[in-house]
């Protein structure tokens, strides 16, 4: 089976949904930001501070290229992974891409105490999320094979919806009463 790649803005639930689905389906879960932090030996915030956003994007592009070549994994990507055309192409062509689409207002609420995302630490986080949504929503749509509008459900409910959608499309084998 080719990989299942989760895309969407920060806080949309990519990591929790990905981990839940992987556990349930017996697949390997990979989070691109965590892979980058492990490989670089520092946090994403430190990389932004040291290299700037462009430097981080170079490292991210290398990670996306490597990780999208793995078979049978569930990959959660960083929210900005769709900014580079080569990443969009790799994601779309090498696996099944699911866009977890959340509204900027819901995300602002969910991330109101977050201190780990460098892009949200200065100024008005809600306004920033609106701006990111405006720029990126078309890129996520272009990259995705499936779009799931999330609302505010629990991770488990969201994972159920993603799984059902992928089963209906024949990407995942139907649970057949086992799950
Ligand atoms: C970013 C999202 C983050 C992380 C970095 C930049 C973005 O990942 O890669 O802070 O540009 O949206 P998550 O989407 O996992 O929070």
Image (tube, rainbow, N blue to C red):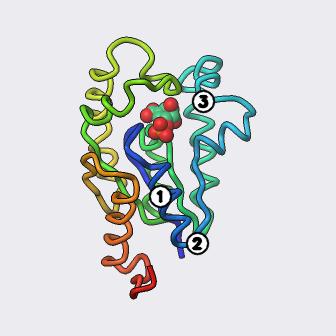
Residue under the point 58% across and 72% down = 26
Q: Where is residue 107 shown, x and y percent of the image?
A: 32, 35
Q: In which quadrant of the rendered view does residue 166 lie? A: bottom left
Residue under the point 57% across and 49% down = 31
Q: Which residue is mark 3?
A: 44
Is disc 3 surrounded by few (<14), some (14 to 19) or many (20+) residues within 10 Å?
some
Q: CA distance from mark 2 to mark 1?
A: 16 Å
Q: Find the residue positioned furthest to the bottom.
A: 176
Q: Nearer the viewer, mark 2 or mark 3?
A: 2
Residue under the point 27% across and 46% down = 152
Q: CA distance from mark 1 to mark 3?
A: 20 Å
Q: In which quadrant of the rendered view does residue 45 lie? A: top right
Judging from the image, what secondary structure is the residue with disc 3 in?
helix
Look at the numbered discs 2 and 3 and tell me whether their residues touch, using CB distance below 8 Å.
no
Q: Nearer the viewer, mark 2 or mark 1?
A: 2
Residue 93 left/right relative to 35: left
Work out whether 60 lies above or below 24: above
Work out whether 92 lies above or below 50: below
Is disc 1 surrounded by few (<14), some (14 to 19) or many (20+) residues within 10 Å?
many
How many dots with numbers?
A: 3
Judging from the image, what secondary structure is the residue with disc 2 in?
loop
Is disc 2 surrounded by few (<14), some (14 to 19) or many (20+) residues within 10 Å?
few
**Quadrant including the C terminus:** bottom left
Judging from the image, what secondary structure is the residue with disc 1 in?
strand
Q: Which residue is mark 2?
A: 26
Q: Find the residue positioned furthest to the top.
A: 123
* Residue 164: image tag: none
Q: Where is residue 96 shown, x and y percent of the image?
A: 43, 65
Look at the numbered discs 1 and 3 and tell me whether their residues touch, using CB distance below 8 Å.
no
Sequence order check, earlier mark of 1 and 3: 1
Mark 3 CB within 8 Å of ligand 1: yes
Q: Which residue is mark 1?
A: 5
């Amino acid at each position: 089976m080719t990989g299942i790649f989760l895309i969407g803005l920060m806080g949309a639930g990519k990591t929790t949904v990905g981990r839940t689905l992987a556990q349930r389906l017996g697949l390997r879960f990979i989070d691109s930001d965590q892979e980058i932090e492990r490989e670089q030996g520092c946090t994403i915030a430190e990389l932004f501070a040291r290299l700037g956003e462009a430097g981080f994007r170079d490292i991210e592009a290398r990670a996306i290229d490597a990780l999208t070549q793995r078979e049978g994994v569930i990959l959660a990507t960083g929210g900005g992974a769709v900014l580079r055309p080569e990443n969009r192409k790799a994601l779309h062509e090498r696996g099944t891409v699911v866009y977890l689409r959340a509204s900027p207002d819901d995300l602002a609420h969910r991330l109101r105490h977050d201190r780990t995302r460098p892009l949200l630490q200065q100024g008005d986080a809600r306004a920033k999320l609106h701006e990111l949504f405006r720029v990126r929503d078309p890129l996520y749509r272009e990259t995705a094979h499936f779009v799931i509008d999330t609302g505010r459900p629990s991770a488990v409910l969201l994972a159920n919806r993603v799984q059902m959608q992928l089963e209906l499309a024949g990407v995942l084998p139907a649970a057949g009463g086992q799950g």
